[in-house]
Image (tube, rainbow, N blue to C red):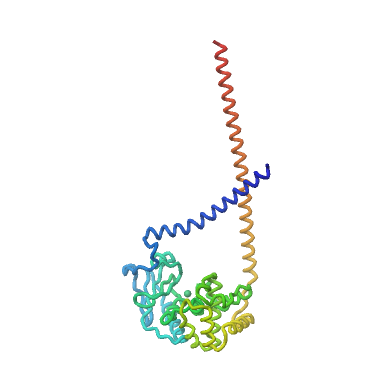
C-alpha cells in the first residue's frame, strides 16, 4: 500500500518533467510558427525584396558593395581583408568575379531571419543582381569564399562548406586554424569519416562543428598537398550528387581515391604536423564538472519535487481532517444548543 503510494508520486513527478520538457520545446517551435503566420510568410521561405530605405550604402570596392543598417558601419580593415580573401580564393580556384558582390551587414540573427527567413550568422546566395552575402559580421571570410565558389558552381556541402571553412568560420576569437579543431576532434575520436559526409544529405546529418571541422581540415590539406586547380573538377559536381559520383570525380581529378588521401591527411594530423596540441585536460575537467553539477542539480530537483509533493499532500490531508473535525464540532454544538433551548421551554 505504502509502496504503491510512493510509486504514484514518482510517476506523477516524472509526468511533470515530461510535460515541462514538451512545454519548453513545444513553445519554441509553436511561437516561431505563430510569428511567421502573423507575418503571413508561413508558406513562403523566399525573401522579400529588400526595402531600399532600410539600408545605407557604406562603401564600394573593386568586388564588393557594402550596405548596413542606419548608423552602422563596416571597418576599413575588414573591407580590405575581404578583397584580399577574395583574391586568394579566386586565384586558387582560377575564378573570375565578374559582377560586384553585395554585402549586407545585419544588426543581429533576428534581423537576418526577419529579412530572408534564414537562421544563420551568414548566408551567401544568388540575388537579383548576382551573388549576395547576408551577414551579422562585419568581417566574414567564410562567406566571401562561398561567394567566389558560387560565381561558377553549386557543389555538395562537403566541398562548399569545407572550402569556405578553410578561410574562416565562427570559431572562438582568436580564430584558430581549422587543422587545430580537426586535431582536437581526432584526439577525442570524434573526427568524422569522410565517406559519411560526402553527400549533401550526409553532411547535414551531423552537427555543424564536427562536420565543418572535418570537411574544412580535409579540404585545406587537399589544397596544400595536391594541385589546387584539380579541385575545379570536383566543384563542378551538382549539389545533390551521390557518394559514388563524388568518389569517381575525385579519382579522375587526383588519380587516387579520396580515402587514400583521407588516410594520409589523418596520419599527418595525428603526427601533429599542422597543430600544436591544445590544452585538452582543463577543458575535459571543466566539461566533467559541468556534467556532474548538472546531474546533481537534476537529482536535487527531482528529490525536492518528491518531498514537496509528499508534504503538500500531508498538509492537504490534515487540512481536510481539521475542517471535518470543525464541521463535526460545529454540528454537535448546534444540536446541543437546540436541545438546550428545547429543554428550557
Ligand atoms: Zn558556409
Closest to the observer: 18 or 111? 18
Q: Where is residue 211 in the image (x, y as percent from the top left)?
A: 54, 73
- The residue drawn where x is 38% and y is 81% is 63
Closest to the observer: 328 or 288? 328
Closest to the observer: 52 or 36? 36
- Location of the N terminus by quadrant is top right
- Location of the C terminus by quadrant is top right
Q: Where is residue 46 in the image (x, y as percent from the top left)?
A: 38, 68
Q: Where is residue 6 in the image (x, y as percent from the top left)?
A: 65, 45
- The residue drawn where x is 43% and y is 59% is 33
Determine whether, in the image, residue 61 is placed left or right of residue 92.
left
Q: Is residue 278 above or below residue 301?
A: below
What is the quadrant of residue 313 in the picture? Answer: top right
User: Would residue 138 be visible to someone looking at this image?
Assistant: yes
Q: In this view, does 67 lie above or below 232?
A: above
Q: In this view, does 55 lie above or below 6?
A: below
Amino acid at each position: 500500500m505504502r509502496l504503491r503510494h510512493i510509486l504514484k508520486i514518482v510517476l506523477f513527478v516524472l509526468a511533470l518533467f515530461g510535460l515541462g520538457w514538451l512545454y519548453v520545446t513545444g513553445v519554441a517551435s509553436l511561437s516561431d510558427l505563430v510569428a511567421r503566420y502573423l507575418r503571413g510568410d508561413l508558406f513562403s521561405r523566399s525573401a522579400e525584396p529588400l526595402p531600399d530605405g532600410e539600408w545605407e550604402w557604406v562603401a564600394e570596392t573593386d568586388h564588393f558593395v557594402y550596405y548596413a543598417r542606419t548608423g552602422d558601419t563596416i571597418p576599413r580593415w575588414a573591407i580590405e581583408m575581404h578583397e584580399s580573401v577574395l583574391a586568394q580564393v579566386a586565384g586558387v580556384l582560377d575564378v573570375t568575379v565578374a559582377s560586384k558582390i553585395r554585402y549586407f551587414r545585419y544588426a543581429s540573427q533576428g534581423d537576418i531571419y526577419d529579412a530572408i527567413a534564414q537562421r544563420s550568422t551568414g548566408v551567401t546566395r544568388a540575388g537579383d543582381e548576382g551573388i549576395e552575402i547576408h551577414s551579422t559580421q562585419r568581417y566574414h571570410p567564410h562567406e566571401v569564399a562561398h561567394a567566389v565558389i558560387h560565381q561558377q558552381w553549386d557543389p555538395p556541402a562537403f566541398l562548399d562548406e569545407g572550402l569556405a571553412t578553410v578561410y574562416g568560420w565562427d570559431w572562438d576569437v582568436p580564430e584558430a586554424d581549422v587543422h587545430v579543431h580537426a586535431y582536437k576532434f581526432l584526439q577525442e575520436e570524434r573526427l568524422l569519416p569522410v565517406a559519411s559526409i560526402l553527400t549533401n544529405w550526409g553532411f547535414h546529418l551531423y552537427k555543424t562543428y564536427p562536420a565543418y571541422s572535418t570537411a574544412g581540415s580535409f579540404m585545406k590539406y587537399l589544397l596544400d598537398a595536391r594541385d589546387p586547380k584539380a579541385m575545379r573538377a570536383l566543384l563542378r559536381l551538382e549539389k545533390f550528387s551521390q557518394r559514388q559520383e563524388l568518389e569517381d570525380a575525385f579519382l579522375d581529378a587526383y588519380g587516387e581515391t579520396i580515402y587514400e588521401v583521407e588516410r594520409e591527411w589523418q596520419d599527418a594530423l595525428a603526427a601533429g604536423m599542422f597543430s600544436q596540441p591544445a590544452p585538452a585536460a582543463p577543458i575535459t575537467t571543466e566539461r566533467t564538472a559541468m556534467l556532474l553539477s548538472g546531474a546533481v542539480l537534476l537529482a536535487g530537483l527531482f528529490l525536492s519535487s518528491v518531498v514537496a509533493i509528499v508534504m503538500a499532500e500531508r498538509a492537504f490531508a490534515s487540512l481536510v481532517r481539521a475542517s471535518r473535525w470543525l464541521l463535526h464540532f460545529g454540528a454537535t454544538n448546534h444540536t446541543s444548543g437546540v436541545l438546550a433551548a428545547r429543554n428550557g421551554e
